[in-house]
Image (tube, grey):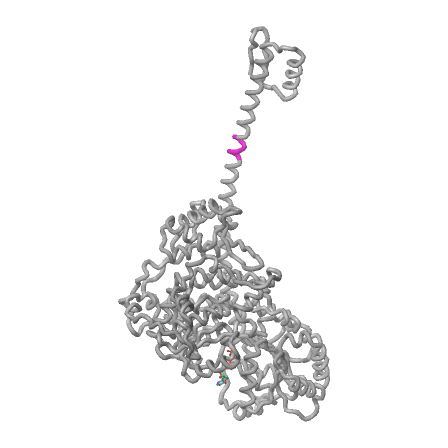
Amino acid sequence: MALQSADDDDLMILDDVDDQLLIEICQAAEQEKSPSRQVLHILLWVAVSKASVSTSLENDELIAIDFEIAELDSQIAHLYKQRSKLEQRKQELKRTLSNALKSSVHGFQKDAVENWRRTDYPWSKKVEHVLNTVFKLQTFRLWQLETINVTLFGKDCILIMPTGGGKSLCFQLPAVVSEGITICVSPLIALVEDQIHQLHALDIDARAINSSTSKTDAAAIMNILNNPNQNHQMKILYVTPEKLAKSKTMMTKLQKLYEMKQFARLVIDEVHCCSTWGHDFRPDFKYLNIFKRLFPKLPLLGLTATATTKVIEDVKQILNIPHCVLFKAPFNRKNLYYEVWRKDSAKDCMEDLARVITQRFDKQSGIVYCLSQKDSEDVCGYLQSYGIKAGCYHASLTGRARTQVHEKWLKNEVHVICATIAFGMGIDKPDVRFVIHHSLSKTIENFYQESGRAGRDDKQSHCLLFFKYSDVFRLACMALAEKSGNGLKNLYSIVDYCLNETRCRRDCIAEHFDEVFQAGDCHKMCDVCSRIRKATKKNCRSDAQIIIDYLKNTVTSKNRLTALKLFEQTTKLVSLNREDHQRLILRLLLDRYIKEDFHLTPYNSICYLIPGPRATRVNDLQCEIYLDVIETNKIATTVVKETTTTAEQPRKKQNILTVPKPKLRWVNDDKKVVDKPSLKRVLEYDDTDSDANENVAELNGEKAVKQHITSVITDEFDELDFL
Ligand SMILES: Nc1ncnc2c1ncn2[C@@H]1O[C@H](COP(=O)(O)OP(=O)(O)OP(=O)(O)O)[C@@H](O)[C@H]1O
């Protein structure tokens, strides 16, 4: 570019004006006291042209970046598509592998299995005799004989059998048949007491050593362990993992027992607790890894009701039993009807709960599992106000109160037990017609185990889960402090199970346990399979974008959003109904478009929501975010026949509404009238009234945050029962 000077006698070429030239011009201007018009002109021109050059450079760069971002976005979209294809393929492969595994059990291992089924072992006659005369049973159930033979043979074994399948017999019978003492590691004192009680009734000498054992009893047990060859009858000694982990004396005694060939076998109940991948990892179980090293010839027998393939592989490695024999009973309980009811508020849930019990399960035996002790008391009170014979059970009640309510329930004087998870292990009532989860379980394993307490008599029974948005965040705060570090992952698996409306519930459970299940085999025994109007998958990308944009624009370091606030504040912006709106937020959370932002203080922990790592993806029109949607909530209410399964019934509002309003009579088990404020509290109980409550796990004391959370979990879940 050329510039004519003001005097028309000087021509400057400015195309290549660079900083150096500019400096020189400035210096020239400085030397002249009053710079000539020409110099000033040039300076001005250079400045303007420099500025415009630099602006256009930035503009260019901005455009280039935009292009680059767009390109990256499309690459990311492509990668996500590829990822979802791979996910699909992964599922297919998992199924194929699982099928192969199944056929290997029934093919390659078939001979081995047949072998373990034999009844001509040296011990077989005695086994049969003890079964009939001591245990007063006629035949073995699936995998019982095989497990007994394996352990009597001296091999290591893991048995996975659904709750109520009959695992106890698999070690109690060999304990009676074998010489020496069987040590059974069990984390649950209440269950151990129950088993000892039952064994004493069968005239089998079983004892326990744990924190509640008296000094005299402990001394007597130690004496037997000191002199194992002396005449004694003790066949089974129950110990807690902590006892083994912490007591050197105990280990020395076991060493002696082993050397004298009086250590019959080590049984590990709830063996999945060894693995951090399990739903219930307990650090003291890890200590059990030394047993195989210290006592290489000692047969190990691990028992569990629920464990995925990954957990079992981990357990084998931890316990040093890579070649153990594995028996796995099918997870499927054909007589159980699984269903999920979506609930908006706790109040709603209470009402429907009372109504469904009076309408469907009048005077029948059942369990309502609640998240906290307070919830179990509230629910119990509410049911009682409906005239339902309900009792409450949780770890803070006295042992006497618990036994009382349990016994009344066994005698059908109390129909419904409203309980925390403290109630369950060792519960052996055959005619439990329903198990209702008033709140979400922590994991699919827990849900499966708890709901599995229904229908032990093989008659049709119901497993109903109330799914509430707020429960997810209540549990998320607790899951955060799980020792295994897998708490949130496990929680989200069950949330996924609840969000599902298009796939057979059994199929979902089967996949979780790495089993293959043909949905047709469900025989309409879940709400999804029996639903007349099927749910469809709806792409909710635009609503997802609205929610995520709202989060992006609203969340700052000072302004945070809880899940409830996000829901409330976006209600008018999205096109979905309340339930689906909440479910979409959860879907986005599970798929990491949104993520949690936990804030821990010494007194509480709050789960806020913020955009997740995949948040920008919703801007891509190609992005697909699917939600299972049922078109109307009033589905098929008029079509369901009395004989059909009950999947549609929760939505029979008109039916439910015909039930009379609850009488406001409120008595607890001791016939004590509960104070009015608490009655009022329960009647007004609604999880929309405080978003803090929704997410806050109340803590006490001033210890470190983690410890506090752990203590909350201990309180909330009554893990005190686990010793
Ligand atoms: N072979 C059998 N024949 C008949 N009844 C049996 C047999 N084996 C076990 N049972 C009964 O089945 C019931 C459940 O057994 P058990 O308590 O051992 O189950 P479990 O698998 O340990 O369940 P959980 O996981 O809930 O503890 C008991 O009442 C037991 O007496």
- Residue 368 vs residue 55: left or right? left
Q: Residue at x 57, y 57 (%)?
A: 601
Query: What secondary structure prevails in the magenta region?
Result: helix
Number of numbered discs on residues: 0
Q: Residue at x 44, y 48 (%)?
A: 623
Instruction: Pinpoint residue 648: horizontal percent, then vertical percent.
Output: 33, 67
Quadrant, the C terminus:
bottom right
Q: Is residue 412 visible?
A: yes
Instruction: Pinpoint residue 299: horizontal percent, then vertical percent.
Output: 64, 80
Residue 63 on the magenta span: yes
Q: Residue at x 49, y 89 (%)?
A: 138
Q: Which residues are magenta?
A: 59-64
- Residue 317 vs residue 191: left or right? right
Q: Residue furthest front?
A: 676
Instruction: Pinpoint residue 224: horizontal percent, then vertical percent.
Output: 68, 88
Quadrant, the N terminus:
top right
| Between 424 and 648, the one nearer to me in the picture | 424
Q: Residue furthest left?
A: 638
